[in-house]
Image (cartoon, coloured by chain):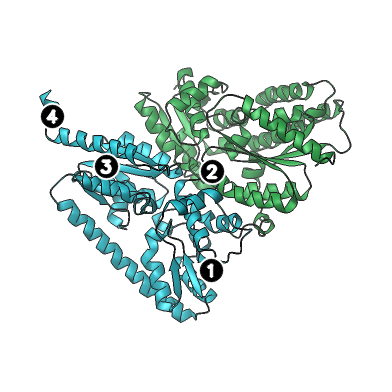
Chain colours: A green, B cyan
Amino acid sequence: MTKYKVSFPHLGNYYVPLERLFTRGLDVEYVVPPAITKKTLELGSLHSPDYICAPFKFNMGNYIETIEKGADTLVQTGGVCRLRYYGELQSQIIKDLGHDVRFITLSRGALSKPVTLYQSFKEINPAMSVKQIGSTLPVVMTMIESMDKVEDFVRKNSGFQKAPGVLETVQEDFMQRLRRTDSKKDVKKLYKKTTDHLLEIPLDKPKNPIRVGVIGEYYTIMEPFSNHDIEKELAKKGIVVDRWVNLTNTLLRKDWKRKKRVRRYTKYFMGATSMFTVDQGLRFAKQKYDGIIHVKSFGCTPEMDAMPVLQNISRDYKIPILYFTFDSQTSDTGIQTRLEAFYDMIMMRKGGLL
Amino acid sequence: MVIGIPRGFLYYKHETLWKGFFDALGITYLISPKTNQEILDRGNEFAIDEACLSSKVYLGHVHWLIEKCDKVFVPRISSYGMDGEVCTKFPALFDLVTNTFADQEIELIHYNMDFRNADAEAPGFVKLGKLLGKSRTKSLRAYLIAKQGEKTQQILEGNKVREAMEQNGLKILVAGHAYNLHDPYLGTPVFEMLKKLDTIPISAARVHDKEIHRASHQISQNIPWVFNRELVGTIAHYQRKIDGIILITAFPCGPDSLINELVLRRIKNPPVLQLILDGQEGTAGMETRLESFIDIIRFKKEGYYDKI
């Protein structure tokens, strides 16, 4: 029997654990979507509604390109905002385009309810075995955790390496090796080796470096192409870039004290990722970071509702916040100008000029 | 004490319920005036630039009320339980208003409706009554009276729509959120224009009917948002009785961006027109589009396209 060729849209480097989940856990073939390029975005925007948020357009582009690459089953996740209805419309659009593929939406599955998750997986491959997925999930989780930790280290130190690009090379090498690991033990061993290697790389870090926190909407913050590599641009200027949002922190761990921490600003849960944004903004402000960058895609309602709260945090703690909205534009110039002005401003503040 | 009620968002859904509740408790309230350019300007000043037009209008209404009353009534509604959920704007609305007007002296009063935390409507109103200094029994009684009023009104609205569907003439279903359709500044001009074009515009945005909820499954099985489910349900339910559908949405409404596209793709007959309101002055562009849309429907009905 030929195996299903399954694909899931890109989100940063997470295609590596996803590939593991699908190939080993669900016993299907996984088609890694081609890397996101301008063409992907153009294809996606062409077939999407006009004022939908940008992640929809990126996903759409990924789908069309993977179908060309031979995928016959497309998977879309569920979410707590517009995301949960993405699948329904995307499957309709792909059908209208004349592609004959299976489209599976996991919007009913929730991590807190394993049964729903099982049902969704069963839809992808009816012949899957519980034993297989049970043995693969812990490996996938360890992979996600270790790659998030490595990414976090690189993000914080990339701006201070003596020879630029060394940390990134080690990280890429780590990602390549991670694809070939076999068990949880392997992943841990590889992680240990990589961290040892990373710590050996000579750094030229001042005692009190400039620190900038990045907060914002789930997709835009995690997919470097959609935020114009804003983290790398910042790191190049010799800045510690801190970002809390990743799959480990948002999906695998629960934080029950968040509501209490943000009580001063919000009485109720404001929907989707806005609580992460407010909580992390507040943390950066309290820890006296030099600035915060807020990224979101155009029209993201939960993040928009968090913005007045951020404005109040900015005023109360005297911390500058730069707001970025991304859509399907592809020019970097405007973004770089704004980033440079922001950088100059925090430098002057640090030097006591302002 | 005077309570200010902003004439925006869910006011158009729960007008009877809110007014009835305050009336039964003998509390004076002040409703902000009908939306006009001045109110929209106030909203534009305080809202995030890319926020949806309806939320800008709402903030304008809140700002108008600030100095004219003691407390502003901003309920937080997170979901309607079994009926479905709402756009994330509504659960965030209370905190959004608090934070937007943090510099100004504004006191809010609200009730919370969140079925995940077992906060249903009735207990919410009892708590609201407590904040107003009324006893539990009194507020519960007031809520029940007001709720009865709301239910009666919904039935009347349903009857009105059913009657309108039986009329002779060109019937156009205007579908959209109640707070856009019935807003005098946003949606009403469309209705007036349609009447001028000698058609019968019908809106079912204020009807709450189980039958309509079920009908929505014919178009899409799992719409999470209750208002959009009603919108799609009315389209599915009355599809065969009407001659045209106009989808009205405020730029850039989140749920509508997906649902309208789906409706446009799945409904081929009768013809569908999507109108996006963006708060610009002048109605000439809209008039032209409506006229040509109605012309196309008329030509189609008279068999004009078959002749050529």
Give the secondary structure at mark 4.
helix
What residue type is disc 1 on?
Lys
The residue that label 3 is drawn on is B245
What residue type is disc 3 on?
Ile
- x then y, percent, for residue B113: 48, 62
Where residue B49 is drawn, which disc sits there? 2
Same-subunit check for callouts 3 and 4: yes
Mark 1 and mark 3: span between their CA atoms?
40 Å
- x then y, percent, for residue A103: 42, 32
Which residue does the image show at 62% across and 28% down from the upper left? A334
- For marks 2 and 1, the one nearer the N-term is 2
Q: Nearer the viewer, mark 3 or mark 2?
A: 2
Q: Chain of mark 3?
A: B
Mark 4 and mark 2: span between their CA atoms?
45 Å
What residue type is disc 2 on?
Asp
The residue that label 1 is drawn on is B71
Please tell me whether residue B104 is drawn above or below residue A18 in the rendered image.
Answer: below
Q: Is residue A270 left or right of residue A248?
A: left
- For marks 4 and 2, the one nearer the N-term is 2
Please tell me whether residue B177 is drawn above or below residue A121 in the rendered image.
Answer: below
- x then y, percent, for residue A114: 54, 46
- x then y, percent, for residue A267: 60, 60
Which residue does the image show at 62% across and 41% down from the upper left? A216
Q: Nearer the viewer, mark 3 or mark 4?
A: 4
Give the secondary structure at mark 1.
strand
Q: Exactly how many numbered labels are in the figure?
A: 4
Mark 3 and mark 2: span between their CA atoms?
30 Å
Give the secondary structure at mark 3.
strand
Q: Nearer the viewer, mark 1 or mark 3?
A: 1
Q: Quadrant of residue A204?
A: top right
The residue that label 4 is drawn on is B304
